[in-house]
Amino acid sequence: MSEAECTGTVLEREGATYRVATPQGTVEAILRGKAKQDGQPRVVVGDRVRLAPEPGGTLFGITAVEPRRNLLGRRVPEGRGTRPVAANIDQVLVVTAARDPAPVPQLIDRLLVVAEANGIPAAVVVNKTDLDPGLALADRCRGAGYAVHRTSARTGEGIAELRACLAGRVSVVTGPSGAGKSTLLNAVQPGLALRTGAISGKGRRGTHTTVGAVMVPLAGGAFLVDTPGFSEVGLWGLEPGELARCFPEMRARLDGCRFGDCRHRAEPGCAVREAVESGVIAPDRYASYVALLAELEQAPRDWE
Ligand SMILES: Nc1nc2c(ncn2[C@@H]2O[C@H](COP(=O)(O)OP(=O)(O)OP(=O)(O)O)[C@@H](O)[C@H]2O)c(=O)[nH]1
Ligand SMILES: [Mg+2]
Ligand SMILES: [Zn+2]
């Protein structure tokens, strides 16, 4: 890296200005040259960008965007198409309480499918193990093929393991309200300056309202991506026929179905249904699949 040029990670956008984390610290940058032209990918949170100093001042120019590993997009409410939200996510952590509030397996599955549909590895955090060990829930998610971390922000169980799981990676932490996401993240890194209400999806207003996501640096080179409304992300472009691939325990069996376009409902010779009937696939995971399939089949096709 020359003195003049460097590479950084986009943390946040406010208007025309981007906050970019570089090895030398966080700088402010604007689009410049080729990066500004139409047809170039719009710069989003998580993008790795090339920076060059702007003449006379502390501002930098973004001269190029490096190729992305993945891209989370969100459907634009009244319009057509999707708006990119964040790029280069390493993992999605779906946090649920073991109890209080009672876990909703179908909601957990939906969030896991969003991650799968976007090609991002996912894991499950079962929190509040001080209230309930959450073993059945953990088994259910492990049986589907996911890593599960059991934690308690109250007793400290699993916090070191969770910290290790976040280390050195870019993570999206999502899950139902009240699961304990903010409490857990504060236990992982006390004093963490999370935007209040952003992780929770509540109380967003002012200049942040239109911003899709914010990355928060953690100690040791890790980042958290705070995407308000993660559940609104990513399912929109999914073809119904692709849904079964977003269930890892089904994915492995799809070649066994008699029909190549099997939707795993009433078709004869369906390897997925056979696995459900023989108890290899959990019935309520299958129920989540059927519910999401119906939703995707009814979704308006206006995303393109
Ligand atoms: N008993 C127990 N309570 C917890 C634990 N973790 C969090 N809580 C409590 O659960 C409640 C909700 O925690 P939050 O961290 O605000 O939950 P959240 O997931 O961030 O919720 P939203 O921001 O609304 O999405 C708070 O009263 C916490 O004190 C835990 O491990 N055990
Ligand atoms: Mg919260
Ligand atoms: Zn089938």
Image (spheres, rainbow, N blue to C red):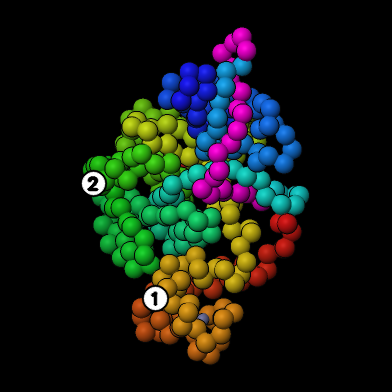
User: Disc 1 vs disc 2: which is toward the camera?
Assistant: 1
In this picture, residue 227 sits left or right of residue 128 = right
Label 2 residue near ligand 1, CB within 8 Å: no
Q: Residue furthest bottom?
A: 268
Q: Is residue 232 something that shows in the picture?
A: yes
State which quadrant residue 285 falls in: bottom left
Q: Is residue 184 something that shows in the picture?
A: no
Mark 2 is surrounded, within 10 Å at the Cα level, by few (under 14), some (14 to 19) or many (20 or more) other residues, namely: some
Image coordinates for residue 292, horizontal then vertical, percent: 56, 67
The residue type indicated by label 1 comes to Ile
Q: Is residue 61 magenta?
A: yes
Query: Helix or strand or loop: what does disc 2 sit on?
Result: loop
Image coordinates for residue 78, horizontal then vertical, percent: 75, 49
The residue type indicated by label 2 comes to Glu
Q: Residue furthest front?
A: 2
Q: Is residue 38 magenta?
A: no
State which quadrant residue 47 falls in: top right
Query: Helix or strand or loop: what does disc 1 sit on?
Result: loop
Image coordinates for residue 66, horizontal then vertical, percent: 55, 39
In this picture, residue 226 sits left or right of residue 138 = right
What are the residue bounds of the magenta stretch? 55-75
Q: Which residue is drawn at the image coordinates 64% and 59% (left, top)? A: 237
- Residue behind mark 2: 157
- Residue behind mark 1: 281
Mark 1 is surrounded, within 10 Å at the Cα level, by few (under 14), some (14 to 19) or many (20 or more) other residues, namely: some
Q: Which residue is drawn at the image coordinates 25% and 50% (left, top)? A: 130
Between 222 and 294, which is closer to the camera in this rendering? Answer: 222
Between 10 and 217, which is closer to the camera in this rendering? Answer: 10
Q: Quadrant of the C terminus?
A: bottom right
